[in-house]
Amino acid sequence: MYKTIAIVMSVIVLAGCSSKEHDAMLGSFEQRMQQSQMLQQSEKLLIKDANETLLAITATYLNGKMSLEDNTTNEQFIVGLYSVTGDEIAPSDINLTLDGQEPLASNKLEEGDSMLSGIPAANQWFVYYRLEFAHTEKKKKIPLQITYPDPQSGEPKNSRLLFSKIAKYL
C-alpha cells in the first residue's frame, strides 16, 4: 500500500516538473522558429574596395508566401545599412529599387523598435529602414536592385539581392 502511494506521488511530482520545462521549451522553440523563417528571407551584400569592406547592406523580406496569395499587399523589407566610416547612410544615398520600382515609403527604425525583434542578427551598428514597394504580381522571385557609386571610379555600380516569395531552404 505504501509502495503504491509512493509511486503515485513520484509520478505526480515528475509530471509536474516536466510540464514546466515543456512549456519553457515550447516558448523557446516558437521564438527560434520565427527567427529561422526570417533568416530564410534575409540576404546581405558587402561593398568592398581592395578587400576592405566599405558598406554592408542587409535586407529581410517581410511578406513571404502571403504576397503570392494577396494581390493588394505592398512588398515590405527591413534594410540595414552600415558604413565603415561611421557616416549614416540612408536608402536615398544608394538607389534601392524592387523590380525597377522606387520605394513608396521609407521609414527609419529606431534602436529597440519592435519590428527589429524578429530580425536575425540585428545589431546596434546598422541603421535600419522599413521600405515599402508596390506589389509585384505573380512573381515567385523578386530582385532588390542596389545601385551605388564604385569606390574607385565613382561610376554607378549595380548589385542585386534575390528574394523568394515561396519557401527557400538553407
Image (cartoon, grey):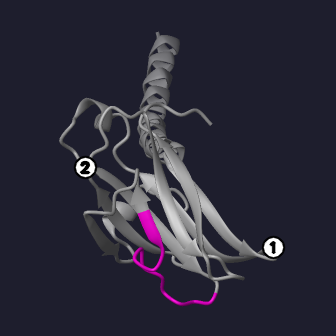
Residue at disc 2, secondary structure:
loop
Amino acid beneath label 1 = Asn
Taking depth in this image into account, of 4 and 46 the one nearest to the observer is 46
At which x and y percent is residue 129? Answer: 38, 70
Contact flag, marks 2 and 1 (Cβ < 8 Å): no
- The label shown at residue 51 is 1
> Which callout, 2 or 1, points at the residue further toward the start of the chain?
1
At which x and y percent is residue 5? Answer: 44, 16
At which x and y percent is residue 65? Answer: 36, 34
The residue under label 2 is 74
At which x and y percent is residue 91? Answer: 42, 74
Quadrant of the rendered structure where residue 84 is?
bottom right
Taking depth in this image into account, of 165 and 40 the one nearest to the observer is 165
Taking depth in this image into account, of 102 and 111 the one nearest to the observer is 102
Q: State yes or no: residue 47 in magenta.
A: no
Q: From mark 2 to mark 1, how far is it between C-alphas? A: 37 Å
Q: Is residue 82 above or below residue 136?
A: below
Q: Is residue 122 above or below residue 16?
A: below
Residue at disc 1, secondary structure:
loop
Query: Which range of residues does the magenta coloring cover?
Result: 85-96
Amino acid beneath label 2 = Asn
For image coordinates 34% across by 44% down, the residue present is 63
Quadrant of the rendered structure where residue 110 is?
bottom left
